[in-house]
Image (cartoon, grey):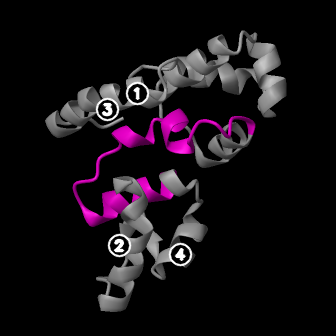
């Protein structure tokens, strides 16, 4: 994951938020969140894999890699654990949001959308994580509405 000093500051501030809403799961990245949720439930990796519909190697990779959880995997995890928001399990809250393109990509993860769903929602094409054209006023409003989930 990409981190800069502002992200690190948000990360530390976020710990207090997690402590208030999710006291049993307090950690810095998605791999520890998945692991701690599994531990809280007192499940083995095999039981956890069966429960989520993911294969065992994927669960082990999630717990060890520290990478952002892919959307298809996140959809299965979010379905299995409705009490935890997808952005929390996936570690998406630490993604950068300095530019409009980064905010759109972060909102995409928060909504647990694939690229086609995001393009449909904002009414613009995205290639290589960037908008293909400068959005007009109408699209800017759609994008603002779509990315508002980050600020909630």
- Of marks 3 and 2, which one's residue comes earlier in the chain? 3
Q: Is residue 80 above or below residue 103?
A: above
- Of marks 1 and 3, which one's residue comes earlier in the chain? 3
The answer, for residue 129, to whether it is visible in the render is no
Of discs 4 and 3, which sits in the foreground?
3
Q: Is residue 117 above or below residue 77?
A: below
Secondary structure mostly seen in the magenta stretch: helix
Check disc 2 and report the residue beneath it: 144
- Of marks 4 and 2, which one's residue comes earlier in the chain? 4
Region rendered in magenta: 80-109
- Of marks 1 and 4, which one's residue comes earlier in the chain? 1
* Residue drawn at 75 percent across, 10 percent down: 44
Check disc 4 and report the residue beneath it: 121
Q: Determine the secondary structure under disc 2.
A: helix
Q: Are marks 4 and 2 in contact (CB under 8 Å)?
A: no
| Front residue (pair 66, 7) | 7
Structural distance between the alpha carbons of marks 3 and 2? 23 Å
Q: Determine the secondary structure under disc 1.
A: helix
The reply to whether the magenta stretch includes residue 98 is yes
Tell me the number on the disc at residue 14.
3
The answer, for residue 31, to whether it is visible in the render is yes
Residue 99 drawn at (x, y percent)? 24, 60
Quadrant assignment, res 131: bottom left
- Of marks 4 and 3, which one's residue comes earlier in the chain? 3
What count of labels does the image hold? Answer: 4
Q: Residues within 10 Å of mark 4 (few under 14, many from 20)?
A: some
Check disc 1 and report the residue beneath it: 20
The reply to whether the magenta stretch includes residue 83 is yes
Q: Is residue 133 left or right of residue 79?
A: left
């Amino acid at each position: 994951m990409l981190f800069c000093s502002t992200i690190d500051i948000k990360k530390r501030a976020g710990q207090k938020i997690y402590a208030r809403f999710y006291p049993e799961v307090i950690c810095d990245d998605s791999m520890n969140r998945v692991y701690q949720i599994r531990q809280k439930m007192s499940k083995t990796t095999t039981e956890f894999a069966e429960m989520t519909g993911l294969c065992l190697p994927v669960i082990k990779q999630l717990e060890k890699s520290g990478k952002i959880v892919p959307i298809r995997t996140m959809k299965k995890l979010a379905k299995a654990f409705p009490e935890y928001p997808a952005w929390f399990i996936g570690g998406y809250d630490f993604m950068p949001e300095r530019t409009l393109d980064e905010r759109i990509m972060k909102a995409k993860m928060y909504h647990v959308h694939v690229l086609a769903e995001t393009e449909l929602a904002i009414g613009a094409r995205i290639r290589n994580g960037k908008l293909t054209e400068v959005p007009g006023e109408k699209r800017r409003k759609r994008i603002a509405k779509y990315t508002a989930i980050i600020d909630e």
